[in-house]
Amino acid sequence: MNFDLSDLRAFVAVADLASFRAAAEALHLSQPALSRRVDKLEQALGFRLLERSTRKVELNAMGRAFLPRARHVLAELGGALLGMADLAERIHGLVTVACIPSAVDNFVARAARGFQQRFPRIRLRVLDQPAPEILMSVARAEADFGISYLGTQEPDLDFDPLVDEPFVLACRRDHPLAQRPEVSWAELAAHDCIALAPGSGNRLLIEQGLAGSGARPRWHCEAQHVPAVLSLAEAGVGVGAVPQLALAAGTSLVGVPLVAPRIARSVGVVRRRGRPLSPAAQAFFDNLNEISLQRLPVKRKQLRKK
């Protein structure tokens, strides 16, 4: 086919920024030059990738299907160059990590700081998503890998555990339960509780953990995501069961261990089975592994390279 990598980079930049003007500025090109590169790519492929109007530009169905393949080609090129000498000074690249929101502060942000110092010209894209969307992003090659608590049962994905993270009771410091060394799930029936909405991965884990225990918390308020539960708890609406690491991001709430039963989720790295990471993604993966061994209160095992 009669196109080159600069045409692919032009298309990916327009797709990422949803603007020919912004993409041209990012690539240090004129808009006509950028348009010619995208037109050349579309002509070589034999189909349009973008729908253009005077007000916006967006991917069509073919563009959405082609985008992860274009990223893969560019990542493979970056990977080949990463193995060469003096990499950090000469290479541009992109690593995309999909992760649950609590992983941003506890894993990704710390790993990113060291990675950026070592590889200043490699860009990092963080997709903070709900757990089910992370699986889709990894499976579709829209992310190099993901950090989630779902994925252990997926036949096409590998799951490397990082930590067993227990659920704790998030409550204000002036709440009667705040000074307790631990609280049983059954005791929550006497208090106003904020629940994660049915259908969420965390709610499913809690319901599975409580099955057969006889404990029935009194849910009087629901929220879709953990940050919303924390905000409602801080406002005094009630108390909520949340993953322990969710309380690490500067909240004023107290986390009290929940017992009888102890319910935990396994947080780990999700990758496509049988597909080695590019050298750029592997470098970030290794940095993440080093951070996790230093940072986490309960370590499962060191991640294995593939």
Image (cartoon, rainbow, N blue to C red):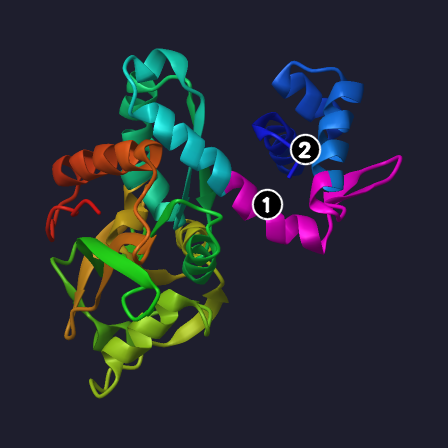
Helix, strand or loop at mark 2: helix
Q: Counting other residues with Cα less than 10 Å from the Cα at mark 1, is it few (<14), some (14-19), or many (20 or more)?
A: some
Assess whether residue 85 is covered by the magenta stretch.
Answer: no
Q: Quadrant of the N terminus?
A: top right
x then y, percent, for residue 125? 46, 35
Residue located beneath label 1 in the image: 67
Which amino acid, by three-letter code, is at mark 1?
A: Leu
Q: Relative to 15, does residue 265 appear above or below in the rendering?
A: below
Which stretch appears magenta? 44-71
192 vs 65, nearest the viewer: 65
Apparent side of residue 65 relative to residue 106 in the rendered image (left or right): right
Label at residue 296: none
Whether residue 97 is visible, yes or no, is: yes
Q: Please name the residue shown 39% across and 50% down the image.
A: 100
Label at residue 14: 2
Apparent side of residue 92 relative to residue 180 in the rendered image (left or right): right
Q: Please name the residue shown 36% across and 49% down the image.
A: 146
- Residue 23 figure quarter: top right
Nearest to N terminus: mark 1 or mark 2? 2
Apparent side of residue 39 relative to residue 129 in the rendered image (left or right): right
Q: Please name the residue shown 40% across and 52% down the image.
A: 230
36 vs 67, nearest the viewer: 36
Q: Please name the residue shown 21% across and 55% down the image.
A: 160
Q: Counting other residues with Cα less than 10 Å from the Cα at mark 2, is it few (<14), some (14-19), or many (20 or more)?
A: many
2 vs 29, nearest the viewer: 2
